Image: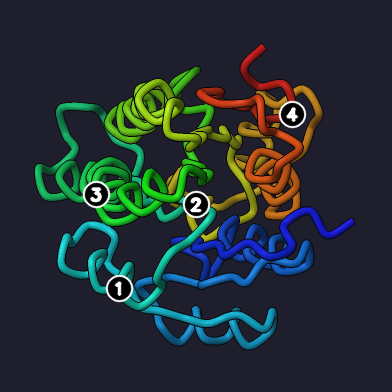
Amino acid sequence: MMRLEGKVAIVTGAGSGFGTGIARKFAGEGARVIVADINLEAAEAVAAEIGGCAVRVDVASGDSVAAMAGAAGPVDILVNNAGITHLPALMEEVGEADFDRVFAVNCKSVYLTARAFVPAMKARGRGAILNVASTAGLSPRPRLNWYNASKGWMITATKAMAVELAPFGVRVNAICPVAGETPLLKSFMGEDTPEMRAKFLATIPLGRFSTPEDMANAACFLCSDEASMVTGVALEVDGGRCI
């Protein structure tokens, strides 16, 4: 079943990791996908694979997001997937530049894309927004304090957006993955060793990391008409870590 047939979707951070998985799934379900990433070469490679189009964007820049929106035109689905973390450290030892960058990419970006895309969604009376948060925003890990906080902000923003936009027919949800096989995994762990992987996996009852396919399947449901009565949720796709 082509659950997203006729839909136009934009996925930020889609040049790698979870974003690539979501872009592939959406295209496979019939959507026309705009692959947005700060790495244009990576975005173009994914777009060529799925028959979409690529656009370069710095999601922390208002001008860049506005340019992306202008190039994309009206969209039915917006996925705020782009995100970064700081390296594991005591909260008082994280540098100010790292703090600012985490909140600019993980939080300010949600505001900027809302400013760019929500007016047209409201005018059309429909739309689906998906924010890729994290279990870190629900069950924080030590030494990732400000990353945890940024994802907690994202979850609260999702619920606030959902309440405000519901009367206009626009749904807003979030997914909360556990650590996955993405370029950010090494940054979360501090070092990618068998011992560190085993330590992380021991906290996940199902015993494995998240995959891009896991996130893509959940994202597809929440952004499809099958979830027409679902808004404001932060869906844990985490192998049971938050239990």
Quadrant containing the N terminus in the rendered view: bottom right
Question: Answer yes or no: do the residues labelled 1 and 3 have beta carbons within 8 Å?
Answer: no
The amino acid marked with disc number 3 is Arg
Q: Distance between the residues labelled 2 and 3?
A: 14 Å
Give coordinates of residue 103: x percent, y percent.
23, 42
Categorize mark 3 by other alpha carbons within 10 Å: few (<14), some (14-19), many (20+). Answer: some
Front-most of residues 164 and 103: 164
Secondary structure under the numbered disc 1 in the rendered image: helix
Q: Nearer the viewer, mark 1 or mark 4?
A: 1
Q: Which of marks 1 and 2 is in front?
A: 1
* Residue 70: assigned label: 1
Q: From what the image shows, is residue 151 above or below residue 67?
A: above
The amino acid marked with disc number 1 is Gly
**Residue that badge 2 annotates:** 79
Secondary structure under the numbered disc 2 in the rendered image: strand
Which numbered disc flags the more N-terminal residue, 3 or 4? 3
Categorize mark 2 by other alpha carbons within 10 Å: few (<14), some (14-19), many (20+). Answer: many
**Residue that badge 4 annotates:** 239
Secondary structure under the numbered disc 3 in the rendered image: helix
Q: How far apart are marks 1 and 2 (CA)?
A: 16 Å
Q: How far apart are marks 2 and 4 (CA)?
A: 22 Å
Give coordinates of residue 226: x percent, y percent.
76, 37
Residue 17 occupies quadrant:
bottom right
Residue at image position (50%, 35%) is 169
Give coordinates of residue 45: x percent, y percent.
58, 86
Q: From what the image shows, is residue 73 above or below residue 147?
A: below
* Left-right relation of 164 to 14: left
**Residue that badge 3 annotates:** 115
Give coordinates of residue 175: x percent, y percent.
57, 35
Residue at image position (53%, 27%) is 135
